[in-house]
Image (cartoon, coloured by chain):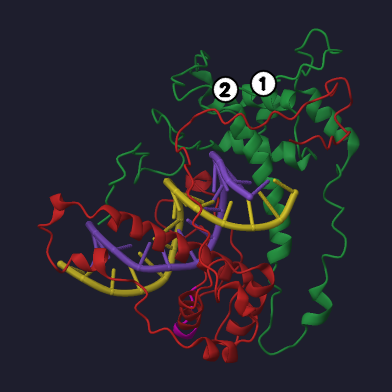
Chain colours: A red, B green, C purple, D yellow
DNA sequence: CTAATATGAATGAACG
DNA sequence: CGTTCATTCATATTAG
């Protein structure tokens, strides 16, 4: 029984009283097999970051198979994409230094997680005709080669000028942003 | 296996959740409960886009509770505001599987100009007055200073010696130290 | 049962 | 400011 109650998990905040009991009502969505199948199909078909409208429609469709919310779909795609990339990244270098790993363990490295058979786009369209196929039909991932400094360098971001705001009462919401 | 192959800052992978990033260097900021409380209070008071001066003030205050930089405050407000709206967008109507009542509720987000104003002007003023915003001598000067985050070397840049007394600050931190 | 893993959820950081 | 990426936390699930 997954009684989802839109629980908010305050990360770490409620560590007080966390000894054993499930005091923190953090019920989370537990997708059904059908839901996962459909989501996986969509993903395999190329859908990576659905728009809000798409998310809502998917959610509506999936609600037939069980309780679901839009944010669940949103998170699912976020996580699925992120983890795929994450695992892909781990495999990327495929060091020789770890060749001794057993073939059993190699499944994580070499196996595509999404070996699920990709249904034809047509069928996908039939299933839920909500995706403009151009969104993923002939478009490749942007693949923006991003440097992405991953450290604490100063990003010189907020250089938005501030006027005489200290003078003003804090009420005036300045729009000067960036 | 949960491998930490990244080799980066092992940010207490399996440690308890809350402890602020003690000893962690270039990992991402992990706000303490007190910091989050204060930020949330300010947000609830109506502060949405703090100015540079405000950011610095807030950052200074929050640094008492743990390592923090100005950009963290900046990002926090950015994210918090954005996700407030994002939730509005991804609001999944508690769709009853049987009842088909999506129409009426579908357009609850007709007006969105509600949240961008302070709930109560006086309250905000009071709240901000708790922060002395008059640090700059000549207020007439535009004082376009950019928030300059320090380098990765933020090894206890704040010389606030945490006394033994502040171990358990009251919940209303804002009132306590002002 | 406990330990390890898979994954939903959350959020800090940053891009466009 | 909306959107997206990356990392982390919490929990359901599964392996041992």
Q: Which stretch appears magenta?
A: A30-34
Question: Is B65 left, or right, of B138 in this rendering?
Answer: left
Kindly identify which numbered label has been placed on residue B126. none
Label 2 secondary element: helix
Residue A100 on image: x %, y % = 9, 57
Image: A123 above or below B127: below
Dot 2 falls on which chain?
Answer: B
Which residue is drawn at the image coordinates 58% and 28% (left, top)? B169
Q: Which quarter of the image is occupied by the N terminus of chain B?
A: bottom left
| Label 2–label 1 contact, CB within 8 A | yes
Quarter of image, res B52? top right
Graded by Cα atoms within 10 Å as few (under 14), some (14 to 19) or many (20 or more), the crowding at tag 2 reads: some
Quarter of image, res B25? top left
Q: Which residue is mark 2?
A: B64
Q: Nearer the viewer, residue A175 or A12?
A: A175
Residue A165 on image: x %, y % = 84, 24
Q: Is residue A27 visible?
A: no
**Do the residues indicated by labels 2 and 1 lie within the same chain of the protein?**
yes
Quarter of image, res B56? top right
Image: A154 above or below A26: above
Q: Residue furthest front?
A: A138
Label 1 secondary element: helix
Q: Residue furthest top?
A: B137
Which residue is drawn at the image coordinates 80% and 75% (left, top)? B105
Q: Which residue is mark 1?
A: B177
């Amino acid at each position: 029984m997954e009684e989802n109650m839109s629980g908010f998990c305050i990360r770490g905040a409620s560590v007080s009283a966390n000894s054993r009991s499930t005091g923190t009502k953090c019920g989370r969505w537990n997708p059904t097999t059908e839901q996962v199948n459909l989501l996986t199909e969509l993903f395999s078909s190329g859908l990576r970051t659905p728009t809000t409208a798409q998310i809502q429609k998917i959610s509506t469709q999936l609600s037939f198979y069980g309780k679901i919310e839009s944010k669940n779909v949103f998170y699912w795609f976020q996580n699925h994409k992120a983890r795929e990339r994450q695992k892909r990244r781990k495999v990327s270098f495929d060091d020789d230094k770890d060749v001794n790993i057993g073939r059993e363990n190699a499944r994580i490295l070499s196996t595509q997680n999404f070996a699920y058979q990709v249904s034809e786009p047509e069928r996908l369209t039939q299933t839920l005709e909500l995706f403009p196929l151009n969104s993923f039909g002939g478009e490749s991932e942007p693949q923006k080669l991003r440097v992405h400094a991953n450290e604490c360098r100063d990003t010189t971001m907020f250089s938005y000028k501030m006027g005489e705001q200290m003078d003003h009462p804090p009420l005036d919401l300045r729009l000067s942003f960036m």
